[in-house]
Amino acid sequence: MDVIPYFLSGLILGSIYGLTTLGLSLIFGVLRVVNVAHGSFVMLGAYAAYFAFILWVWPPFATALLAFAIGALLGYLVYIGVIKPLNKAGELNVLVALFALGALIAEVARLLWGPDFVGYRWNIGSVEVAGLQIDISKLAGAVLALSIALFLDLLLRRTYFGRSIRAVVQDPVGAVVVGINVDRVFAASAAIGIAITTVGGVFLTLFIPVGINPYMGGPYTLIGFVIAVLGGLGSLLGAYTAGLLLGVIESLGFYAFSVAGFAEPSEMALFLEFALLLLVLLFKPTGLFKL
C-alpha cells in the first residue's frame, strides 16, 4: 500500500522529534520551567553539525558528542545566569527571560553566520523497506534517538542520580532533609535537558539538508510544545512516544491531503497536529501517555 512508506517515514522523523522534546520535558518536569528558548538550542545543534561537517568532515553522529558537551555547558550557564536568579521572582519572569534569551541567541547566530539557509548532505547509502528507499543515516539517527530515550529513562529509574531527581520532583524540602543537594540536581537537569535538545538539533540536519538558518528554531519550539503536551508534561517516554505519533500524523496527513488535492498539504498536516492538541487539552489535559 502507498500509505506504508509514509507511515515508516513518519516513525523515523517522529523519533527525532521525540528526542528533541526529551530535554524540554525533563526541564519542565524537574524545574517546573517552560523552556521557550528550546528552538534556539535546536538551531545551535544544527549549526554545530553543519560546521563540523564542512570544516572537519565529521559525521553527525560524531558531532553529537561535541553538541552534547556544548549543550550541557550552555544549560548549566542558563540555570546559573537566568533560571536560578529569577525563579523566586515568579514563573512569568523566567518565561520572559528565556524568551529574550532565545531571541538573543538567534540574533547572535545571524550576526556570526548570516541569515542565509545552509546545509549539507551525508549520504552513506540506503535500504529498501516496504518499497521505500530509506537513507541509512536517517534510520541510524532514529535508532540512536530511541537508544538515548531508553538510556535516559534507565538513568532516571536505576541510578542514584535519577532517584535524586525523582525525590526532588516529589518533595524538594524532603530531599534537602535527606541530604540531596537540590540546587545541584536542578543545575544538572538543566544541563542534561539542553544538551539533549542540542543533540536533537544535530540529528534533525539529516532531514533538512538546506534548512539550517538562525531562525529555524521557532517551528521546532512549537512542535516541541505540542509533543510535550500530547505526551504529558514531565513524562520523558511519553514525550518520545508522542514524538513518534506526531511524526506519523504529519507524514500521513501530508499524504492524505496531497491525494485529496489540497494546494498546501504540509500546512494542512500542521493544522491536523494542532487540532489533535486541542482535542487532547479538552478531553485529557494531562496528556495521552501520562496517568
Image (cartoon, helix red, strand yellow):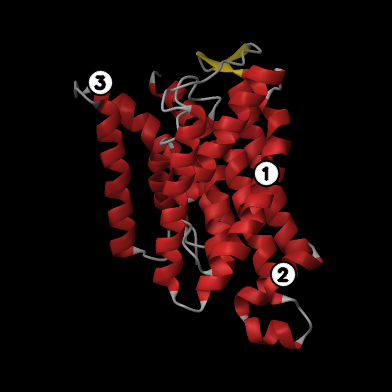
Between tags 3 and 2, which lies in front?
2
Q: Residues within 10 Å of mark 1 (few under 14, many from 20)?
A: some
Taking the view exactly as shown, the residue that stands out farthest to the front is 111
Image quarter of the N terminus: top left
Depth check: give the residue in front, 84 or 272: 84
Horizontal and vertical percent position of residue 121: 57, 15
The residue depicted at 60 percent of the width and 51 percent of the height is 194
Counting labels gives: 3
Q: Which residue is mark 2?
A: 184
Cα separation between marks 3 and 1? 43 Å
Foreground tag (3 vs 1): 1
Image position, residue 291 (x, y; %): 50, 67
Quadrant in the picture for residue 120 = top right
Disc 1 designates what residue? 70
Judging depth in this view, the residue of 112 and 83 nearest the camera is: 112
The label shown at residue 157 is none
| Mark 2: amino acid | Arg
Work out whether mark 3 precedes mark 2 in sequence or the reverse, and give the earlier one. Answer: 2
Find residue 100 and report its horizontal and vertical position in percent. 42, 55
Per the image, the residue denoted by label 3 is 259
Q: Nearer the viewer, residue 146 or 201?
A: 201
Q: Amino acid at mark 3?
A: Val
Can residue 15 be seen here? The reply is: no
As drawn, 217 above or below 158: above
